[in-house]
Image: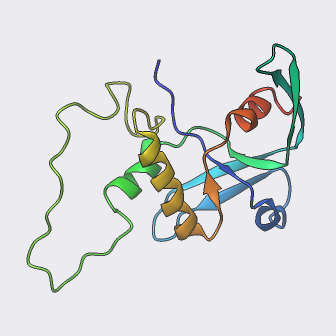
Amino acid sequence: MAVGLCLCSWSAGQAVHQGGQVFEQRIPGTTIEFKMVKVDGGTLQIPADDGGVQRVEVGDLWFSQTEVTWDLYDVWVYELDQSADEDVDGVSRPSKPYIPPDRGFGHSGHPAISMSRHASVEFCRWLSEKTDRRYRLPTREEWTHAALGGA
């Protein structure tokens, strides 16, 4: 099963002024934007190592409304937000992959899949620098809490 990259941001203070429980993030220098949805914090009960139940507090977070699409991920991978340097005679890039990165599931408008954790973390670092917001991958507990709808 192919799982797409999902983001979360704990910089809710920056987003709240935009009003409501949803805000749109535009990537500077591109036409790409995505939506972030607020998930209220709460207490999550997860199985403990000793067989009991452990209570974990999860703070308020903002999660991407959908998985990161190839349209957004490609901007980072192929540096589509960078302008060409007029003084350069040539640009060397890595060879294109032999297997399509979307594994035949679809590219434009579809979730970005099959990247490594390292690539996901670096993507979040790039996105944070581009937008002046702090983006990262959710922890297991945060993901579980969001998947349960904050319940």
Residue 8: where, in percent of width, then height? 67, 48
What scheme was used to colour the molecule?
A: rainbow
Label total for image: 0
Q: Residue at x 80, y 64 (%)?
A: 18
Q: Residue at x 40, y 38 (%)?
A: 115
Give the residue furthest to the left. Answer: 89
Foreground residue, 98 or 25? 98
Residue 21: where, in percent of width, then height? 83, 50
Q: Residue at x 52, y 60 (%)?
A: 125
In the picture shown, does residue 132 fall above or below 125?
A: below
Give the residue furthest to the top. Answer: 51
Give the residue furthest to the bottom. Answer: 87
In the picture shown, does residue 63 fall above or below 75?
A: above
Q: Is residue 20 left or right of residue 26?
A: right
Residue 147: where, in percent of width, then height? 74, 28
In the picture shown, does residue 36 fall above or below 133?
A: above
Q: Is residue 120 left or right of residue 66?
A: left
Q: Residue at x 65, y 66 (%)?
A: 133
Q: Quadrant location of residue 145? A: top right
Residue 149: where, in percent of width, then height? 82, 30
Q: Is residue 16 left or right of residue 68?
A: right
Q: Where does the C terminus fall, quadrant-wise?
A: top right
Foreground residue, 148 or 54? 54
